[in-house]
Amino acid sequence: MATVAVVVVGLDLLVKQLTVAHLEGHEPMKILGGLIWLMSLRNSGAAFSFGTNATFIFPCVAVIVIGVIVWLTRRLSSLPWAVSYGLIVGGAAGNLGDRIFRAPGVFVGHVVDMISVLNSQGTGFPVFNIADSALTCGVILAVLLEFTGRRRDGTRVKS
């Protein structure tokens, strides 16, 4: 779990640094024929700019999520659950870093987002980053593991 989380945080930080260095102040960059657009966007809220006036809540939630997952891993014996938890922790930690260390200040920092789907203006679908992607994939994997009866101790629910 820790390895996955560290890889996610490292990749997220690298891509955010490249975004700030090479995309900030420039026009969006089209890739894959316009399926994906790369841009630099600072987001004070969550997806669809939800909660822009309550930025301080997001780092608090991230700290709680990370703490709960670390506590849950005490009895973890399942590789798929470890990957799921690692993706969630890495995603939460990646955006938490922005909330703490980026302007305008501690616990109200704006997250750097850079990936837009099908739109050069970043409308219609939220602009997101690597941490958001990891977090989403980790939650989807956790839901699938639950629905397929896979327990955190490595066993399966008997039907």
Image (cartoon, rainbow, N blue to C red):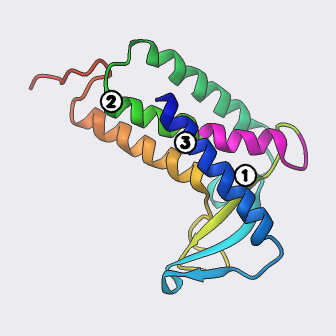
Mark nearer the viewer, 3 or 1 = 3
Q: Residue 125 location in percent, x, y?
A: 56, 68
**Dominant secondary structure, magenta:** helix
**Residue at mark 3:** 7
Q: Which mark is residue 30?
A: none
Classify 10 Å Cα crowding around label 3: few (below 14), some (14-19), many (20 and above).
some
The alpha-carbon separation of the residues under discs 3 and 1 comes to 24 Å
* Secondary structure of the residue carrying numbered label 3: helix
Q: Which residue is mark 1?
A: 45
Give the residue type that dot 1 points to. Gly
> Residue visible at 66% across and 32% down?
61
Mark pair 2, 3: CA separation:
16 Å
Instruction: Specify the segment rendered in magenta.
Output: 92-105
Q: Where's the C terminus, which quadrant?
A: top left
The residue carrying mark 2 is 79
Q: Which residue is pictured at 61% across the width and 39% down the height?
A: 92
Mark 1 is surrounded, within 10 Å at the Cα level, by few (under 14), some (14 to 19) or many (20 or more) other residues, namely: many
Q: Nearer the viewer, mark 2 or mark 3?
A: 3
Label 2 or label 1, whichever comes before in sequence order: 1
The answer to whether the residues at label 3 and label 1 have Cβ atoms under 8 Å apart is no
Q: Which comes before the other along the chain, label 2 or label 3? A: 3
Residue for point 49% across, 40% down? 87
| The magenta stretch spans residue 31 | no
Amino acid at circle 2: Leu
Q: Is residue 25 left or right of residue 65?
A: right
Disc 2 crowd rating (10 Å Cα; few below 14, some 14-19, many 20+) is: few
Quadrant housing residue 121: bottom right
> What amino acid is at disc 3?
Val
